[in-house]
Image: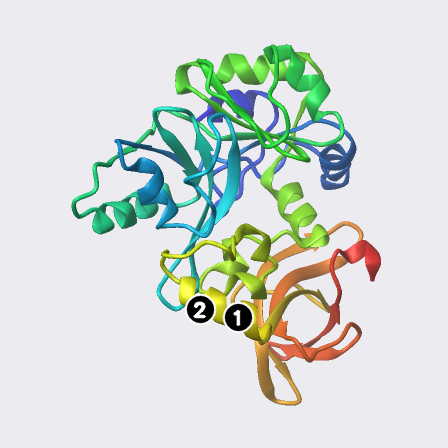
């Protein structure tokens, strides 16, 4: 954890908030950096798992919703880990680093424990890698800034060159430095033009853009939170696969991810009502500089933008995502 460095650079913290810094400056400026600059974020609660052994690909293929057997070396993807009812238990990234598959997840210890429960005769080794930190570089300027680290991989490719592993996507890069090298990495990126951004701005950006995370997705079906893109419907033999196939055939999930605009602060986990009947629940809830009290909600599909709902005695308005389309 880089707390001493962050505090020297003006970090502010939430007493009961996420492990990472809450903010470094005005939220609106940090939001603009996330979109147009090169925002550097700390995801201290994420962890890294290394899956090795001769059966590593087949084992992980049978655990998640994505095609792992055919994942080329140097490529990575976003995936889900479901229960037997098709509900989301974990979300993560899988990177084919050659002799090992690298899994990055918010609850790495819980996911590693799940893996170990399913090992029977598989030639697989599960190793948690606590010496790796997880950082994120995002924004229109992220790629240019990342070049300070040397050659960067193409989109949806990764580099396992020591000491800093890199995974690049459409909006930026995940950085997995060795802990002793992390401070030097952060300073190098700041010198190249990155700006530290706290979790407050990240959460606001995520809600405004309609990007789900476990606050709304845990225990839900992928199709109900906009994560169907993480499911390969052509593969079989994984936990929850029968439910995914049934939903694909029928095409009738009952809920979808929408935005909620509140009259006052909304609470994650609160139930949402319309005409006295429960119609969903509140996911990630934030205070947006542009929109006020907003949240992601997993709501009944029959709700429409502009509909009024009730949350803990207060009225809220349903809106489509992303919020700039409201």
Name the residue: 63% across, 16% down. Answer: 189
The crowding category of the residue bearing disc 1, from other C-alpha atoms within 10 Å (few below 14, some 14 to 19, many at least 20), is some
Specify the quadrant that holds the C terminus.
bottom right
Q: For the N terminus, give its image quadrant.
A: top left
- Is residue 270 in view from this perspective? no
Instruction: Tell me the residue at 49%/71% (across/down).
Output: 246
Label 2 neighbour load within 10 Å: few <14, some 14-19, many 20+: some
Q: Which residue is at a point 64% across and 18% down the rendered structure image?
A: 146
Could you tell me which residue is drawn at 69 percent across and 60 percent down?
A: 294
User: Residue farthest to the left?
Assistant: 121
Q: Which mark is residue 300?
A: none
Expressed as whole percent of the image width and height from the top left, the position of residue 50 reads 33, 31
Is the residue under label 2 in contact with that under label 1 (CB below 8 Å)?
Answer: yes
- The color scheme shown is rainbow
The x and y percentages for residue 309 are: 69, 79
Give the labeled residue for mark 1.
Answer: 247
Is 175 placed above or below 147 here? Answer: below
Up/down of 186 relative to 286, above or below: above
Give x and y (percent) for residue 129.
Answer: 33, 29
Q: Nearer the viewer, residue 132 or 14?
A: 132
Provide the secondary structure element on which disc 2 rests: helix
Q: Secondary structure at mark 1?
A: helix
Closer-to-camera residue (27/179): 179
Residue designated by label 2: 243
What's the distance in space between the residues labelled 1 and 2, CA to CA?
A: 6 Å
Total count of labels: 2
Picture quadrant of residue 301: bottom right
Quarter of the image where one finds residue 150: top right
Q: Is residue 303 visible?
A: yes
In the displayed orientation, state which residue is furthest to the right: 325
């Amino acid at each position: 954890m880089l707390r001493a460095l962050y505090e020297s650079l003006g970090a502010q913290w939430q007493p009961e908030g996420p492990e990472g810094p809450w903010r470094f400056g005005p939220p609106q400026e940090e939001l603009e950096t996330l979109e147009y600059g090169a925002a550097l974020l700390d995801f201290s609660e994420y962890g890294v798992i290394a899956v090795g052994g001769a059966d590593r690909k087949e084992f992980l293929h049978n655990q998640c919703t994505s095609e792992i057997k055919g994942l080329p070396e140097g490529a990575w993807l976003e995936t889900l880990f479901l229960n037997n009812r098709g509900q989301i238990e974990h979300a993560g990234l899988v990177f084919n680093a050659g002799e090992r598959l690298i899994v990055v997840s918010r609850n790495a210890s819980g996911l590693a424990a799940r893996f170990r429960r399913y090992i029977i005769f598989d030639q697989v080794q599960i190793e948690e890698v606590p010496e790796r930190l997880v950082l994120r570089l995002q924004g229109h300027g992220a790629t240019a800034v990342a070049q300070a680290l040397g050659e960067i991989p193409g989109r949806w490719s990764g580099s396992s060159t020591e000491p800093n592993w890199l995974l690049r996507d459409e909006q930026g890069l995940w950085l997995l430095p060795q802990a002793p090298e992390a401070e030097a990495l952060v300073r190098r990126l700041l010198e190249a033009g990155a700006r530290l951004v706290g979790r407050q701005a990240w959460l606001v950006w995520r809600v405004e853009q309609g990007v789900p995370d476990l606050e709304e997705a845990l225990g839900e079906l992928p199709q109900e939170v906009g994560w169907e893109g993480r499911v390969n419907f052509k593969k079989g033999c994984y936990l929850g696969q029968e439910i995914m196939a049934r939903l694909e055939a029928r095409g009738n999930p009952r809920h979808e991810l929408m935005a909620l605009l509140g009259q006052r602060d909304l609470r994650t986990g609160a139930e949402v009502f319309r005409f006295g009947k429960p119609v969903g629940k509140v996911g990630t809830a934030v205070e947006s500089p542009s929109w006020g009290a907003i949240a992601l909600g997993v709501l009944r599909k029959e709700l429409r933008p502009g509909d009024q709902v009730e949350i803990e005695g207060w009225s809220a308005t349903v809106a489509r995502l992303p919020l700039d389309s409201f």
